[in-house]
Image (tube, rainbow, N blue to C red):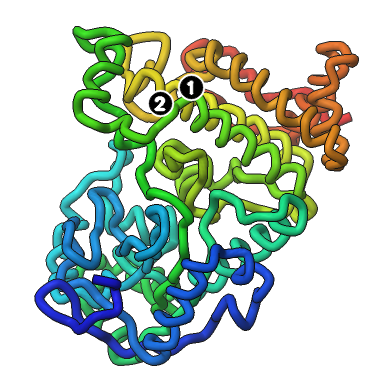
């Protein structure tokens, strides 16, 4: 099977309109794909000018032509024939699946992260995304950003990064959009119906991209943990016995993440966005491929467009913390202790809990930073200062903390500690 054969019990074809195509918008990126990938996509795109394949179910499944792994609620995959396991991903076809109404009906019944909100309202209020669907706004933003990054990466390094390669964005017909909207609004409380309408205002889309590798991600290694009876070595043996480490070299994986993160910085991209923590980070453990790549460019920004010093430094240190968490999870699994690693139930735990892995990750980042500099890369001066071992600890951190903790207004709301102690410390020093 080649993903282009006739519809059947596994999938059907649905009308759609092409509104973005990498061959037209970023031909230099498409040209970097291997010959086998390019030939496959040329044929696939030729047959998919006005329609798309849609799975018969939104649920996880493994079929002869397509598959949807557990946890991939908006992604449908096919392994590209003639390649070493490369994948095409279609994001957003789930809104067309015949049984998606069942999922939307269940979403208000699921609590999210013990934060007093359900899954439906989480998607709309926090992420401002359509549940189990994809909007035109999302599709075009992701495609354009991924294309720009891949073009910059290829110009510098002569190949594409272990990162999504955008292929196409399709707009779904108005009738399909209205059908999904009616189904969604039927599950919304009156308080969020207007928000749901706003989220859907750009229309529904399907984003198609290629990943040049296996889509196996770090979540596949979260169990068993090193804290289980078998300990750290027992965990490794269990993963090997289950075949979860087949073809995986964790040392190379970790180094791949660090190198890609540094190269993104060298190209003027910041992979993390501190202020949008709950909407996901490209380098978060759930988005880390086991071959050393990253998925989901949602948090990636041009450094030149970062709005403030505070945002820059907070987001950069968040990058370091995320990578440290990735490494710790890769080695130990999903750990939850009363103190130490993962002291709380919600990732990523307290800052001191990651001190050990953070210090080692910093050494790896510094190694790749030096390698890129030696190869002629020019980094943002703020990053150069942080990685400059010739400067004192004070000199490297003074500007950071001055930016992270800027002067505030005359009044701030009291903290819980202020109230308990009755100290009245919510009155702060005047702004200089």
At a point 63% along the width and 24% down the height, the residue shown is 426
**Residue at left 58%, top 76%?**
22
Q: Which of marks 1 and 2 is nearer the N terminus?
A: 2
- Across and down, in percent, residue 286 comes to 40, 41
Q: Name the residue under label 1.
A: 416
Quadrant position of the C terminus in the picture = top right
Residue that extends furthest to the left in the rendered view of this protein? 9
Dot 1 crowding, Cα within 10 Å, few <14, some 14–19, many 20+: few
Residue 204: percent from left, percent from top: 39, 78
Q: Mark 2 points at which residue?
A: 330
The residue that appears at 68% across and 45% down in the rendered structure is 264
SS at mark 1 in the image: helix
In the figure, is residue 387 to the left or right of 284? right
Instruction: Measuring from the top left, give residue 238's x and y in whole percent.
Output: 22, 20
Q: Report if residue 138 is visible in the image.
A: no
Marks counted in the figure total 2
Question: 299 and 16: which one is in front?
Answer: 16
If the image is split into quadrants, where does the N terminus sit? Answer: bottom left
Q: Which mark is residue 57?
A: none
Which quadrant holds residue 349?
top left
Whether residue 297 appears in this view of the structure is: yes
Dot 2: few (<14), some (14–19), or many (≥20) neighbours within 10 Å? many
């Amino acid at each position: 099977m080649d993903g282009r054969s006739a519809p059947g019990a596994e999938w059907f074809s649905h009308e759609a309109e092409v509104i973005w195509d990498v061959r037209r918008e970023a031909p230099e990126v498409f040209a970097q794909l291997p010959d086998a990938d390019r030939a496959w996509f040329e044929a696939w795109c030729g047959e998919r000018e006005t329609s798309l394949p849609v799975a018969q179910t939104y649920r996880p499944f493994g079929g002869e032509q397509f598959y949807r792994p557990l946890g991939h609620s908006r992604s449908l995959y096919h392994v590209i024939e003639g390649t070493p396991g490369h994948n095409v991903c279609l994001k957003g076809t789930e809104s067309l699946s015949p049984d998606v109404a069942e999922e939307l009906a269940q979403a208000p019944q699921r609590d999210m992260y013990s934060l007093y909100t359900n899954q439906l309202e989480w998607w709309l209020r926090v992420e401002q995304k359509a549940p189990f669907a994809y909007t035109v706004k999302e599709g075009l933003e992701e495609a354009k950003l991924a294309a720009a990054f891949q073009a910059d990466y290829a110009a510098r390094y002569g190949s594409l990064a272990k990162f999504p390669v955008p292929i196409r964005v399709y707009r779904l017909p108005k009738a399909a959009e209205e059908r999904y909207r009616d189904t969604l609004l039927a599950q919304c409380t009156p308080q969020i119906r207007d928000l749901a309408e706003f989220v859907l205002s750009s229309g529904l889309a399907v984003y198609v991209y290629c990943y040049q590798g296996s889509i196996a991600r770090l979540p596949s290694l979260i169990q068993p943990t090193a804290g289980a009876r078998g300990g750290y070595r027992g965990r490794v043996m269990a993963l090997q016995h289950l075949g979860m480490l087949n073809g995986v070299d964790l040392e190379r994986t970790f180094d791949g993440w660090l190198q890609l993160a540094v190269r993104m910085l060298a190209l003027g991209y910041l992979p993390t966005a501190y202020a949008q923590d709950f909407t996901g980070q490209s380098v978060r453990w759930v988005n880390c491929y086991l071959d050393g790549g990253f998925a989901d460019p949602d948090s990636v920004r041009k450094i030149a467009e970062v709005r403030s010093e505070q945002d820059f430094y907070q987001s950069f240190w968040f990058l370091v913390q995320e990578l440290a968490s990735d490494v710790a999870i890769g080695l130990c699994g999903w750990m939850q202790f009363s103190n130490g690693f993962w002291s709380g139930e919600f990732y990523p735990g307290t800052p001191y809990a990651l001190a050990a892995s953070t210090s080692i990750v910093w050494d790896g980042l510094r190694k790749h930073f030096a390698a890129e500099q030696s190869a002629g890369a020019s980094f943002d001066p703020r990053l150069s200062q942080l990685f400059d071992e010739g400067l004192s600890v004070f000199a490297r951190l003074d500007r950071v903390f001055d930016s992270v903790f800027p002067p505030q207004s005359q009044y701030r709301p009291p903290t819980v500690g202020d109230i308990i102690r009755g100290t009245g410390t919510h009155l702060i020093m005047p702004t200089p």
